[in-house]
Amino acid sequence: MRILLMHPNYHSGGAEIAGNWPPAWVAYLTGYLKAAGYTDVHFVDAMTHHLSDEQVRARIEELQPDVVGCTAITPAIYKAEGLLQIAKQVNPAIVTVLGGIHGTFMYPQVLKEAPWIDAVVRGEGEQVFLNLVSAIDDGSFGRDRGCVRGIAYLADGKVVATAAEPSIKDLDRITPDWSILEWDKYTYIPMNRRVAIPNFARGCPFTCSFCSQWKFWRDYRIRDPKKVVDEIETLVKDHGVGFFILADEEPTIHRKKFIAFCEELIERKLDVLWGINTRVTDILRDEQLLPMFRKAGLVHVSLGTEAAAQLKLDRFNKETTIEQNKKAIRLLREAGIVSEAQFIVGLENETAETLEETYRMARDWNPDMANWAMYTPWPFSDLFQELGDKVEVFDFEKYNFVTPIMKPDAMDRAELLDRVMHNYRRFFFNKAFFQYPWTRDKGRRSYLLGCLKAFAKSGFQRTFYDLGRVGYKGPQSKKSVDFGFDASRTYERPSAAALAEADAGWITMHGPKIEHKRRQGELNAALACGSGEPLEAQPVVAMACGGGREQLSEEAEARV
């Protein structure tokens, strides 16, 4: 049986400005398939190669696969649907499969707008996709599609979702096949080195309202640190990788295993540097360990500082304060680690003053880099439900962190974009002329100037923040900016009963939290729609990143 995996050709000028990122999902999925005996696996990376639909069609015609699988995050969903439609046009007998986070939760809409998709894989893909391929191979899928757990499909025009497949408890059972990727195509521009994105853990013990990773992976599981380093050693020695970013949202959650991971890297003395995303509170917790992290090769930490005002930090369920953010950045600087502050902007209560406040804080905290990301209300997140009718744009292709989906009450979207660009210009002008060139540490200076090069390159090419597409050329062009929202794209919000049913059949680890958060979301949605007091009048309780006020306890660590 021949299997073709595809990555859709979607670009938005966000994280990709730093280079071409290797789609790690392909390596993990291919390795799992090959271990089960399905070795005829091929991959088409339409994104990295900027392939047109006709070029993809030619590859499908050449390969003549039996199964075509494509992944999709939310902004890439229309591209993914289009590629699977091309596969059906080439040969109607091809079984078309969609995976990824968008299809996992939005399968009712996906199947209705793209009925040529034979199955949607929901959640963690390796075991579900293997079971599906096996069922196609032995003919049972053709007789009864309901025999495969963890999928959704259309039957006589009705959407059917089968029972969830249990998550893979031992992630070290998955041995990725990194050879499926063309490594000379994946370069991290700041260092001019090949880049990889290996997996350290899946899931999260917390439940931040703006995030959905904890919901997608269902259970928090972490790998054996030595086996992760084995994988990194393979990437370095066999594929020439010189830089990696851990794929986890917050790899420092499990303190003991993260420390063991760093110790293993130090012991092996691999020629590789790396970066992570993590929480401010974890940096403060590990203050004394930061020099050891740097010795292990950690050079870049992106911090979810997120918002200007404490009100927003509370809305995002993050127990963090302005002073904590400033201290975490200082500690990273003292340890020789590059810090990046992430600000979320563009909620309905955004004003010119709050945007200016984020700039003032960025200058005060003095991170090495700052990023202003437009709030993107994932349609399957709790915060999306709470916002209710305040979300008016359902053109999911624009849900990309650079397009203002929400319209602030105090300004239009073009002004929001212009003020964000004003922040970028001032911040990086200061860094380019007064800080980066004068950094004493040569390695750190080289890295920062490399980041500046990537930033400048995308700016000159007008790919940064999708500025070329929307027609933004500076403050003078505000009136002509066109975000190109497709007004024909609509979304029918599921009922409370439908949400409850989906949660009951899907979530395992966070069940009690889900029920509470769903009920609170329904209340907030009603308030947002005008049937009660405004949201701002409700008491706001600051919570830790997700569920409580504490770090992952030693007892909880021992259970993972």
Image (spheres, grey):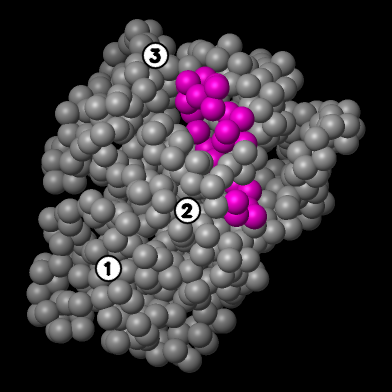
What amino acid type is highlighted by mark number 1? Phe
- Residue 466 seen in the figure: no
Start and end of the magenta stretch? Answer: 269-294
Q: Characterize the local packing of mark 3: few (<14), some (14-19) or many (20 or more) Cα atoms within 10 angstroms.
A: many
Q: CA distance from mark 1 to mark 2?
A: 26 Å
Q: Is residue 396 above or below residue 524?
A: below
Which residue corresponds to the image point at 51% horizontal and 64% vertical from the top-left?
A: 234
Q: Characterize the local packing of mark 1: few (<14), some (14-19) or many (20 or more) Cα atoms within 10 angstroms.
A: many
Which residue corresponds to the image point at 52% horizontal and 20% vertical from the top-left?
A: 284
**Which of the two residues, 310 or 250, is positioned nearer the viewer here?**
250
What amino acid type is highlighted by mark number 2? Val
Residue 188 x/y as whole percent: 67, 56
Residue placed under numbered mark 3 in the picture: 542
Q: Is residue 353 above or below residue 347?
A: above
Mark 1 or mark 3, which is nearer the start of the sequence?
Answer: 1
Query: In the picture, which quadrant includes the C terminus?
Result: top left
Q: Which quadrant of the view contains residue 536?
A: top left
Element marked by disc 2: helix
Residue placed under numbered mark 2 in the picture: 229
Element marked by disc 3: loop
